Amino acid sequence: MTSGPTTPAEPRPLSGSDLGEVLSEYRSIREGIERSILPLATSVDGVTFDLQSSLYHLDLTRGGYVVIGATDEARLGQVTDLRVGSIDASEGALAPGASVHVQLAQGSGLLLEGEGRPFHAEAVRPATSEEVAAWCARNPTRYAGLDVGELLLAPGVPATLDSGGLDRHTFMCGQSGSGKTYSLGLLLERVLAETTLRVIILDPNSDYVGLGDIREGVDGALAERYASVPTQVDVWRNDPEATHPLRLRFADLDRAAQAAVLGLDPIRDRDEYARLAELLAHREEGKALVSGPSELLESDAPGARDLGLRAMNLGVFDWSVWSPDLPSLIDEIRRPSARCTVVDLGSLDTPQEQRLVAQAVLSTLWESRLSREPCLVVIDEAHNICPAEALDPVTLLAAEKAVQIAAEGRKYGLYLLTSTQRPHKVHENVVSQCDNLLLMRMNSRADVADLSRVFSFVPEGLMAGATSFRQGQALVAGKVMPRATYVKMGARVSEEGGADVPRTWAAPREEA
């Protein structure tokens, strides 16, 4: 007689003590497996590699340098991403078919040397600073080196930028308090000390007016190399007693800027626009009927008084930037007497004057482009000078010139270096033309993700590290640093302007 199918026995519930023993055994097996995971790397293309390591003895870091393989065939690489991963693993102590869910470190990276040779399951370990320094010595910069500090993850190894890479536009950004202003000043110091490149700085917060002043107590080789720089720096500020008072002549502005200052539209205000053009015609030959806004009211020429009243109602007469007598900044931009010109926009009384001076500088540089004189054009707080959305006609003109220089300026020797706290508020056609990136701490993951899209040549894992940077730490990538790397900025030589207000108000109150 054949028996029917048997019913599986119901699992017996575990008691508290039994459950504790099972969990303890499970954890012991899992920890044993996790501790046994070796740090290994594999590459199928000889350019990039994937790696694994135990979390219990993890000494690899994102952005850090590693040595892969045996001593006689070792390769130097850089970890570009590192994360917690998991796998299901089996172990002899387990029941047949059972597995343990274990965690491990998984990541990826780029080979810095020994490219072209695929490999599998090669041992990987952190590189020493000496090994990284030796690699740097084997791969020196092609042009003058700019030592801006040290490699963050290889202490003691100089972080040397290739100055020749500045012939590509550069974008620098960092959250308030990240050290962006200090670091930009340091970079400019090195450019002035190590190259002959002309520099023009649009300085909205008076942060770089001290580039010609060496700090007290600075000595050594760097101070010696910087010793000749102070005589090459001219600061143009809004002070009639200054060596270089920041002044413009209305007649020197281009036609579009003149009209924008007076709020004139060439179509809507066609009669006044045409009359202004007539009054300011032939200014190069000195035959113009008027040269500045105040003369409009005094002129007997038809239509001049109406234009003068317009300027007066707009407050243009009150701008301190006008001067028919003092030297004009435009003359300096066209025919420089100094190698470095700091335009102290922060010393001007109104935002309208700041925007106008910035527009005048950019427009004059573009107008003079056929001279093909190499020039680094530094635009700090670029979201105010070339914003994504301009709110007034003068800013719109400045943004248009910045975009034009970004798109076509390189072939004429005009190289942009734009700096901002708000990358999403800078005109996208300026940012997208930049081939160099200096990224400091950014709290916004959305901003970092957007920058990762624009600067797609930088590994996403390295970009993500910007949210955890400390003050003075940066990611540098592009033509100035072909291998993207983390940098710790070094010491300044010159005085830093625009310092924060001292926090004396936060000191503990004395007891009564």
Image (cartoon, rainbow, N blue to C red):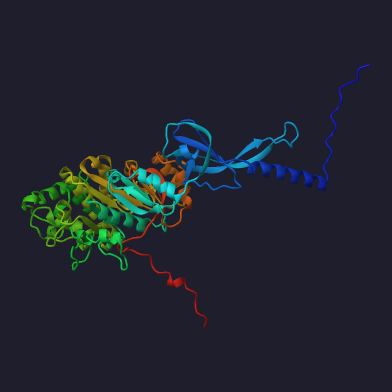
The number of numbered badges drawn on the structure is: 0
At 68% across and 42% down in the image, what residue appears?
30
At 32% across and 49% down in the image, what residue appears?
418
In the image, 285 versus 88, the foreground residue is 88
Question: Looking at the picture, how far across and down is residue 426, in whole percent?
Answer: 35, 47
User: Left or right: 97 with respect to 389?
Assistant: right
User: Residue 216, located in which quarter of the rendered image?
Assistant: bottom left
> Is any atom of residue 55 visible in this view?
yes
Question: Looking at the picture, how far across and down is residue 331, in whole percent?
Answer: 14, 54
Q: Where 497 falls versus 446 (above or below)?
A: below
> Is any atom of residue 399 visible in this view?
no
Quadrant that contains the N terminus: top right
At 36% across and 52% down in the image, what residue appears?
420
User: Left or right: 221 with respect to 484?
Assistant: left
Question: Looking at the picture, how far across and down is residue 266, in whole percent?
Answer: 20, 44
Q: Kindly give the residue lying farthest to the bottom in the view shown.
A: 512
In the image, 509 versus 28, the foreground residue is 28
In the image, 206 versus 97, the foreground residue is 97
User: Left or right: 464 with respect to 1?
Assistant: left
Question: Looking at the picture, how far across and down is residue 370, in whole percent?
Answer: 16, 42
User: Residue 434, located in which quarter of the rendered image?
Assistant: top left
User: Left or right: 93 with respect to 448?
Assistant: right
Q: Kindly give the residue lying farthest to the front in the view shown.
A: 72
Q: Kindly give the residue lying farthest to the top in the view shown.
A: 1
